[in-house]
Image (spheres, rainbow, N blue to C red):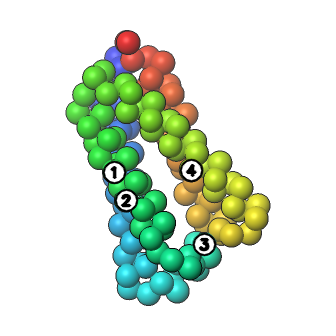
Amino acid sequence: MAATGVYEKRLFFIGALWNWSAAMLFFGLSVVNKELLSYFHKIPETMLWYYGFLAAVFIFGIGYFWISHDVWRNRNIIKMGIIGKTAVFLLFFAYLVKGEITLLLFMAGCVDLIFTILFIKVLLRTPK
């Protein structure tokens, strides 16, 4: 399968949708009723860092959208995605162990780990 094929474009488009959906869901919950966040994690004392994280998640989604249009020219964004999604998974694992997030949110981190593996496979097949 060519690294600029339909599979790769769909993968990164789905990755964009995943990030946008997550950012909008958690932002929406925080606006409607902050207490709803307790189903996923402890409620932050201040929303500044929380909203900053959600903005980064959304912006990474824009990067995945760009990749979905031109995989070959966006190799470096793929690398950023691999680093970012790996970091999210590791942070979610650490905070699950600490008891600060729920298993439900950790499972979303596992989806990021799956994306990481798929992104690595694409990166290895994409010509430099």
- For marks 1 and 3, give the one nearer the viewer: 1
Spatial separation of the CA atoms under disc 1 and disc 3: 22 Å
- Tell me the kind of residue under disc 1: Ile
If you read the primary sequence from the N terminus, does the residue marked by circle 4 or circle 1 appear first? 1
Q: Which residue shows up at 45% across the image and 70% down it?
A: 48
Q: Give the labeled residue for mark 2.
A: 55
Mark 1, other Cα within 10 Å: few <14 / some 14–19 / many ≥20: some
User: How many marks can you see?
Assistant: 4
| On-image quarter of the C terminus | top left
Q: Give the labeled residue for mark 1.
A: 59
- Tell me the kind of residue under disc 4: Val
Q: Left or right: 72 with respect to 121?
A: left
Spatial separation of the CA atoms under disc 4 and disc 2: 14 Å
Q: Which residue shows up at 31% across the image and 27% down it?
A: 74
Q: Residue furthest left?
A: 69
If you read the primary sequence from the N terminus, does the residue marked by circle 4 or circle 2 appear first? 2
Element under label 1? Answer: helix
Q: Residue furthest top?
A: 127
Image disc number at residue 88: 4
Spatial separation of the CA atoms under disc 3 and disc 4: 14 Å
